[in-house]
Image (tube, rainbow, N blue to C red):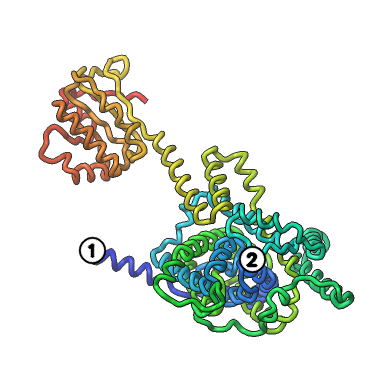
């Protein structure tokens, strides 16, 4: 009967992940006209900010800027509609650039879109498997390390457009990329440098004088109109813009996102790839990386939003919605998307009250594409590079790294440094994987130090009771697992031959793993072969169950299990219990 009940309960838990969860919860609490006004204004503000940011992130990922806008429209609308967070804004993010740029280089937009759809399927499976709490198992030094590493990679990717360099195709890895940029230093453009520098200056000075309009919008508007004015006044003045860089499409196409099968877009050769199992298999590592980073970043952003608003999101519903948003975006020319912390925080500060704010943000982006495509096509490439340099700076978390450097244990700093360097030199997947493994190993080492074994003295001066001199009493405290076996059981292998009985106290052992069980079997076998009897004292439910399953307590009187020290004393011929030394 139990076998039937457990799957039924799991199915019920899955069915509870209904769509529109955050939207329904907010509606049930009461939704007023004031809430609607706040959502519309917040969505309008965030949508205007998202337009240039989405374009810049698409260009940094190696595709045309309109695909970033399509991502903000499709995934940005569907994810909050179906999701479990009231305030999450979804779209292209800077963290994805380091993953998406190599995919676009090797597989083109077709591979990028198909990998995004595959990642969406993986995210849905993660949500159905109730893996929304996965963020709890990613240590803080790992997230800080790979985020800072991603920031450095993004910054190096902007050097080309910021300085107007002509290095040709940039290598995928960090060190060769720096070499290619340095080799192209003679092609630096004074015009592009000036545009980038002015944009950075405006980003810095704008908040000091104007607070109601975001610096991103003000700075880019001034630079864009300034460049357009200079080009009209001085015919010889020319700056690289979205329209000139992507002349094949005339800049940003004015229109809604087109429905296209993900594999029907152009591959690296310009032709659509042939859809096959081998092609899908080649994209699977990329899809896994996208799903992993998407889950981590989205859930981190939702947690921060909860802290700002004193609410709670449903992580499993959020993963399900993120998966649906990524699948849909792939069919409309969008990039992989995840929760965007900066846009989420901007929406909250602008007065967002429900998921309707994030949905309004997507509709705002759509409105800009439909009505103002020619204008946003005139954004200078150097200005967008400056924008991403600012994003990379804020993403680097320099203050947090400095704080951790002062207060964190040395092992955590080692994890942070390893994750940072591996992310920069190789990629995010290697950095995160190595960081989690290293953090786990350091944690196991610390736990192993807490598991100890000690011999309890026999003399009256030590215990207050005279144990028989031929009885060896040994206590183990802490979880007995593979990392602590030698430390805890080593002394049992060197017992004097005169000992006729071993009392092994397991009262403080909450858990026993397979490695420890095998080691304990070997020790008990050696003791029995030496003619010694063994009394196990106070074994907990889990260790006792494993010992019985291994057959150590059945049909062999040489190994006995008792519940208390009193019982152990009666078995070895002494009724007066010992006082254990602490």
In front here: 560 or 155? 155
In front here: 158 or 288? 158
Counting labels gives 2
Secondary structure of the residue carrying numbered label 1: helix
Secondary structure of the residue carrying numbered label 2: helix
Q: Is residue 41 visible?
A: no
Question: Could you say where residue 547 lies in the image, as x and y percent from the top left?
Answer: 21, 42
Question: Could you say where residue 181 lies in the image, as x and y percent from the top left?
Answer: 68, 57
Give the quarter of the image for residue 381. bottom right
Q: Residues within 10 Å of mark 2 (few under 14, many from 20)?
A: many
Q: Is residue 137 visible?
A: yes
In front here: 424 or 475? 424
Give the number of the mark in front: 2 or 1: 2
Q: Are marks 2 and 1 in contact (CB under 8 Å)?
A: no
Among numbered discs 2 and 1, the one appearing first in the sequence: 1
Give the quarter of the image for residue 133. bottom left
Marks 2 and 1, Cα distance to the nearest angstrom? Answer: 52 Å
Question: Could you say where residue 203 lies in the image, as x and y percent from the top left?
Answer: 77, 61
Image point (81%, 70%), residue name: 222
Image point (63%, 61%), residue name: 170
Q: Residues within 10 Å of mark 1 (few under 14, many from 20)?
A: few
Question: Could you say where residue 400 lies in the image, as x and y percent from the top left?
Answer: 63, 48
Residue situated furthest right in the rendering:
233
Q: Which residue is tagged 1?
A: 3
Q: Which residue is tagged 2?
A: 60
Q: Is residue 286 left or right of residue 531?
A: right
The circle drawn on residue 69 is none
Q: Is residue 495 above or below residue 236?
A: above
In front here: 368 or 363? 368
Q: Is residue 308 left or right of residue 222?
A: left
């Amino acid at each position: 009967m139990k076998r039937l009940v457990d799957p039924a309960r799991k199915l019920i838990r899955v069915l509870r992940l209904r769509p529109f969860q955050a939207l329904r919860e907010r509606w049930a609490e009461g939704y007023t006209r004031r809430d609607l006004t706040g959502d519309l204004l917040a969505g309008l503000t965030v949508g205007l900010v998202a337009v240039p940011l989405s374009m810049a992130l698409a260009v940094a990922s190696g595709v045309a800027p309109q695909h970033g806008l399509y991502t903000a429209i499709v995934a940005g609308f569907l994810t909050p509609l179906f999701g479990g967070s009231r305030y999450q804004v979804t779209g292209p993010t800077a963290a994805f650039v380091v993953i998406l740029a190599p995919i676009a280089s090797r597989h083109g937009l077709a591979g990028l879109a198909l990998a995004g759809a595959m990642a969406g399927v993986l995210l849905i499976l993660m949500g159905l498997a109730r893996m929304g709490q996965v963020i709890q198992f990613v240590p803080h030094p790992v997230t800080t390390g790979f985020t800072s590493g991603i920031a450095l990679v993004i910054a190096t990717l902007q050097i080309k457009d910021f300085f107007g360099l002509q290095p040709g195709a940039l290598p995928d890895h960090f060190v060769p990329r720096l070499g290619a940029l340095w080799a192209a230093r003679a092609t630096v453009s004074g015009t592009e440098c000036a545009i980038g520098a002015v944009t950075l200056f405006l980003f810095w000075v704008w908040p000091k004088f104007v607070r109601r309009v975001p610096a991103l919008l003000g700075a880019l508007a001034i630079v864009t109109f300034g460049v357009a004015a200079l080009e009209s006044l001085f015919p010889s003045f020319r700056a690289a813009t979205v329209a000139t860089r992507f002349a094949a499409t005339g800049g940003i196409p004015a229109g809604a996102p087109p429905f296209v099968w993900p594999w029907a877009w152009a591959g690296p050769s310009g032709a659509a790839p042939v859809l096959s199992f081998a092609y899908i298999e080649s994209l699977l590592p990329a899809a896994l990386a996208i799903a992993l980073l998407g889950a981590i970043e989205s859930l981190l952003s939702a947690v921060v939003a909860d802290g700002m608003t004193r609410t709670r999101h449903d992580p499993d519903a959020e993963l399900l919605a993120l998966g649906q948003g990524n699948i849909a975006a792939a069919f409309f020319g969008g990039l992989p998307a995840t929760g965007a912390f900066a846009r989420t925080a901007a929406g909250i500060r602008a007065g967002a009250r429900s998921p309707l704010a994030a949905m309004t943000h997507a509709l705002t982006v759509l409105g800009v594409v439909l009505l103002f495509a020619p204008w946003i096509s005139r954004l200078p490439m150097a200005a967008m590079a400056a924008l991403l340099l600012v994003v990379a700076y804020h993403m680097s978390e320099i203050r947090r790294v400095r704080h951790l450097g002062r207060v964190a244990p040395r092992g955590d700093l080692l994890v942070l440094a390893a994750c940072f360097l591996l992310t920069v030199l190789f990629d995010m997947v290697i950095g995160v994987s190595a960081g989690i493994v290293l953090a786990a190993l350091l944690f196991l080492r610390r736990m192993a130090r807490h598991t100890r074994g000690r011999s309890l003295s026999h003399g009256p001066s030590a215990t207050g009771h005279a144990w028989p001199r031929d009885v060896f009493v040994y206590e183990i405290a802490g979880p007995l697992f593979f990392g602590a076996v030698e430390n805890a059981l080593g002394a049992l292998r060197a017992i004097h031959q005169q000992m006729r009985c071993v009392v092994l106290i397991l009262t403080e052992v909450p858990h026993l793993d397979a490695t420890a069980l095998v080691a304990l079997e070997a020790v008990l076998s050696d003791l029995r072969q030496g003619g010694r009897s063994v009394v196990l004292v106070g074994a907990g439910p889990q260790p006792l169950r494993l010992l019985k399953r291994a057959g150590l307590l059945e049909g062999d009187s040489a190994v006995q299990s008792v519940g208390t020290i009193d019982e152990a004393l009666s078995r070895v011929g002494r009724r007066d219990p010992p006082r254990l030394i602490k």
